[in-house]
Image (tube, rainbow, N blue to C red):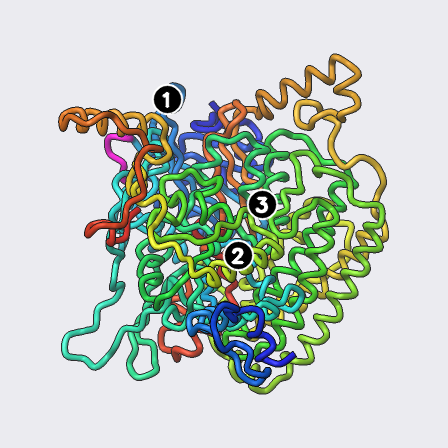
């Protein structure tokens, strides 16, 4: 199957006049071609910190062979990557590093949060562990597991391909505005309740109704949210 | 209470260390105790340095190997005289004895003189004890935060610190070293996110041309604190956490933990469980050495050994998956045995895995051992002398590479290692090449052990029948009331350990992996301290690379096999 055949049917808009030019030429939108190229040659950057990084190595090695999905060109420089795998626990000491590296990646960019530690802190409800990287950077696909099997990672890469094809991309750290995400109250239930009570009091002083953690909308990061949090 | 301020037990002074300290220090020795084979000596704070020096320098004692130093918080324990204790573990290679030295440190004045002048390895351990417990070590050269970050407030391992209280870090520490005024030297930062740092740790090197003049390391980028988590978990709930210490060979960590708790409880595992543990531990050792060697040479530009050796790793993954369903973080051991019996075709699977390992080993051996580029990059680089290696507290293949034939499997056999015939390889120079050769030979010896263990794999149960420790079989739970009660009590209360303390140690892939457990007699431990072997190895790294080339530093770090999960815990 030639390249042109590949384009045919997939990207050709049948309502567009002048499509059928005898098989030697096609017409499509530039946007569709760019997305097709982008999705078929993802350059991932592994941000591996812990056990998940070992399983990520298995995912790139011969048996699972990520090259089948066009994503085998691992780049350790964020400047040359468009997909970041955050594989492993991110602790508060590492958070500014992760944020810096994410900011250094050129647009458009996607993030896979590999494993429960990166997604939610996992079973480390501890004083030094970030409870999910979406406190500071946006995440496109979460992969559960401790660590996830390589098959799950393959699924995640395919989901990223779907997102690229659809032109969708997460722009906002999902939990950046959640109460306690940059501070102390996130795990300890008692502290969290105190923080809620403080917030309710301050809202009452302004004449606003109380608002819990679930009711807070995710908003685009303002000036002060752009700094690394957590 | 035995764990904190032990009275002098009658048989203890017979041990030379206790006798010497009691003669030399007189009433400044507060207690001596010989519990479960661990000799523990408590001295008063003023005698701390004298006691450590006596233990190290007396030729009949010869405790020259530094193992571990940690703090313990006895908050709310009425029977313990002071809130904090500092606990030191030392080992003597010549007499083959461990010793635990303790001293009380009052909360009002938490100060203790440093011993980092006596043991090179004590430096980071004292920084850690300051960081986590707030114990000030007077005279320490650089008493700053090590595991937590600079914006951290408080000392998190104290019992009154809430486990979930976080502190945001806005800006990390930029410079660890300063360029001298007016010089043309430059600082190169490597890590914490860098392909040559396998994991997340950081080195800064001050360069004069290509030569490293000075170097400084920083860790803590993976500090999720297993030890704090363990203080609120049952003994068996801690097993999954141990898997994530050295995740390249997670089975061995669980094995060590189970043995330490079994030592505390006095409940041995049945012979079949021990034999399976030995087999899977040795496969894990092969797997760990594969990661170490293959990623080390990837850093030097050789990618083929990586692909060749990872084939064997996948074979071991398959074996572990057949036994317990997980590939990497297995959680297969239980206190008193194993979680389930091995599959019926276990022996056949093991032999197939062995064949894969042998094939990979031979291929890597042909690719590397006499490869002139490899040899030139490795020989006489990163040399560590025998005495320094002991003082830093090195263990495992790195220590044996420096010529000290200390292997826990040989010197203090556990899990039936005394039944198997194997050799302990040692190096002569202590360079990178020796450490590589030791690892390669250990892989061969591990295969020998596995073959012997397979040949006489005993039949029988894989978990103890002691109902205070192990759940009864499901069929019994549904059919008789006693088993139902046992099941109920064990699930709700957990394993209840006797009060006391224990240091359990095994030969993990990186060396002596020790678990120091302090129990108050409940179902959760008061304190769990891991002696992480690569913590000591990495501590020496900035000192090893001084005077060498920057490219050699990359070759050296891979050979130390630093695993972030074990380093920062």
Image: magenta residue range: B107-111
Is label 2 in a helix, a strand or a loop? Answer: helix
Q: Which chain carries label 1?
A: B
Eyeballing the image, is B266 above or below A14?
Answer: above
Is label 3 in a helix, a strand or a loop? Answer: strand
Residue B505 numbered mark, or none:
3
Residue to which mark 2 is pinned: A159
Q: Which of A109 and B332 is in front in this view?
A: A109
Q: Residues within 10 Å of mark 3 (few under 14, many from 20)?
A: many
Q: Quadrant of residue A110?
A: bottom left
Is label 1 in a helix, a strand or a loop? Answer: loop
Residue B263, how many percent across, how many down?
A: 62, 35
Eyeballing the image, is B289 above or below B3?
Answer: below
Residue A28, how many percent across, how many down?
A: 47, 74
Kindly tell me whether residue B558 is visible in this rendering: no
Q: Which chain carries label 2?
A: A
Q: Mark 3 lies on which chain?
A: B
Residue B76 numbered mark, or none:
1
Mark in front: 2 vs 1: 2
């Amino acid at each position: 199957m030639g390249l042109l055949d590949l384009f045919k049917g997939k990207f050709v808009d049948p309502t567009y006049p002048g499509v059928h030019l005898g098989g030697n030429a096609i017409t499509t939108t530039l946007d569709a071609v760019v997305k097709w190229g982008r999705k078929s040659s993802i350059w991932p950057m592994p941000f591996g910190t812990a056990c998940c990084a070992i399983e990520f190595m298995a995912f790139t090695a011969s048996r699972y062979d990520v090259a089948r999905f066009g994503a085998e060109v691992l780049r350790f420089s964020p400047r040359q990557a468009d997909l970041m795998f955050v594989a492993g626990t991110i602790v508060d000491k590492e958070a500014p590093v992760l944020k810096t590296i994410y900011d250094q990646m050129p647009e458009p960019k996607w993030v896979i949060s590999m494993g429960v530690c990166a997604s939610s802190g996992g079973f480390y409800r501890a004083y030094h562990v970030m409870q999910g990287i979406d406190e500071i950077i946006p995440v496109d696909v979460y992969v559960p597991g401790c660590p996830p099997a390589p098959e799950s990672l393959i699924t995640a890469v395919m989901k990223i391909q779907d997102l690229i094809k659809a032109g969708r991309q997460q722009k906002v750290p999902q939990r950046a505005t959640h109460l306690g995400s940059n501070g102390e109250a996130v795990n300890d239930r008692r502290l969290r309740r105190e923080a809620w009570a403080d917030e309710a009091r301050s809202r009452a002083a302004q004449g606003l109704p109380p608002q819990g953690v679930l009711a807070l909308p995710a908003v685009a990061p303002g000036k002060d949210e752009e700094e690394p949090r957590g | 209470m035995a764990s904190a301020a032990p009275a002098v037990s009658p048989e203890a002074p017979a041990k030379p260390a206790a006798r010497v300290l009691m003669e030399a220090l007189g009433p400044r020795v507060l207690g001596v105790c010989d519990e479960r084979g661990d000799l523990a000596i408590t001295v008063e704070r003023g005698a701390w340095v004298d006691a450590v020096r006596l233990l190290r320098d007396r030729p009949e004692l010869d405790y020259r190997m530094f193992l571990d130093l940690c703090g313990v918080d006895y908050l709310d324990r009425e029977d313990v005289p002071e809130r904090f204790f500092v606990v030191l573990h030392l080992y003597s290679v010549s007499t083959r004895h461990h010793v635990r030295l303790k001293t009380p440190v009052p909360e009002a004045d938490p100060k203790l003189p440093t011993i980092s002048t006596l043991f090179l390895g004590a430096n980071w351990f004292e920084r850690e004890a300051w960081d986590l417990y707030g114990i000030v070590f007077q005279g320490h050269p650089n008493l700053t935060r090590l595991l937590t970050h600079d914006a951290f407030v408080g000392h998190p391992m104290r019992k009154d610190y809430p486990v979930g209280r976080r502190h945001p870090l806005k800006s990390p520490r930029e410079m660890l070293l300063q360029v001298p005024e007016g010089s043309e030297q430059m600082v190169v930062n490597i890590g914490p996110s860098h392909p040559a740092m396998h994991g997340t740790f950081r080195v800064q090197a001050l360069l004069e041309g290509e030569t490293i003049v000075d170097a400084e390391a920083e860790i803590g980028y993976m500090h999720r604190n297993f030890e704090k988590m363990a203080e609120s978990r049952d003994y068996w709930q801690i097993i999954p956490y141990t898997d994530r210490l050295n995740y390249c060979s997670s089975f061995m960590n669980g094995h060590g933990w189970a043995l330490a708790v079994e030592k505390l409880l006095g409940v041995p595992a049945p012979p079949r469980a021990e034999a399976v543990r030995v087999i899977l531990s040795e496969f894990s050792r092969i797997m760990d050495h594969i990661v170490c060697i293959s990623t080390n040479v990837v850093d030097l530009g050789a990618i083929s050994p990586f692909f060749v050796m990872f084939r064997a790793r996948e074979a071991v993954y398959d074996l572990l998956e057949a036994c317990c369903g997980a590939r990497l973080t297995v959680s297969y051991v239980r206190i008193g045995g194993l979680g389930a019996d091995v599959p019926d075709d276990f022996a056949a699977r093991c032999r197939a895995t062995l064949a894969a390992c042998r094939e990979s080993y031979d291929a890597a051996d042909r690719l590397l051992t006499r490869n002139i580029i490899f040899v030139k990059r490795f020989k006489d680089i990163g040399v560590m002398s025998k005495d320094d290696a002991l003082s830093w507290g090195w263990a495992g293949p790195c220590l044996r590479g420096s010529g000290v034939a200390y292997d826990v499997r040989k010197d203090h056999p556990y899990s039936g290692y005394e039944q198997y015939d194997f050799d302990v390889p040692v190096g002569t120079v202590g360079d990178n090449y020796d450490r590589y050769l030791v690892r390669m030979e250990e892989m061969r010896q591990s295969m020998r052990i596995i073959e012997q263990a397979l040949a006489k794999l005993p039949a029988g149960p894989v978990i103890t029948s002691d109902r205070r420790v192990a759940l009864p079989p499901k069929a019994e739970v549904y059919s008789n009331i006693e088993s139902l009660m046992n099941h109920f009590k064990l699930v709700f209360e957990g394993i209840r350990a006797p009060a006391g303390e224990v240091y359990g140690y095994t030969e993990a892939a990186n060396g002596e992996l020790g678990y120091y457990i302090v129990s108050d007699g409940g179902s959760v431990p008061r304190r769990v301290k891991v002696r992480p072997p690569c913590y000591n190895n990495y501590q020496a790294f900035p000192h090893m690379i001084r005077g060498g080339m920057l490219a050699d530093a990359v070759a050296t770090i891979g050979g130390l096999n630093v695993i972030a999960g074990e380093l920062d815990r």
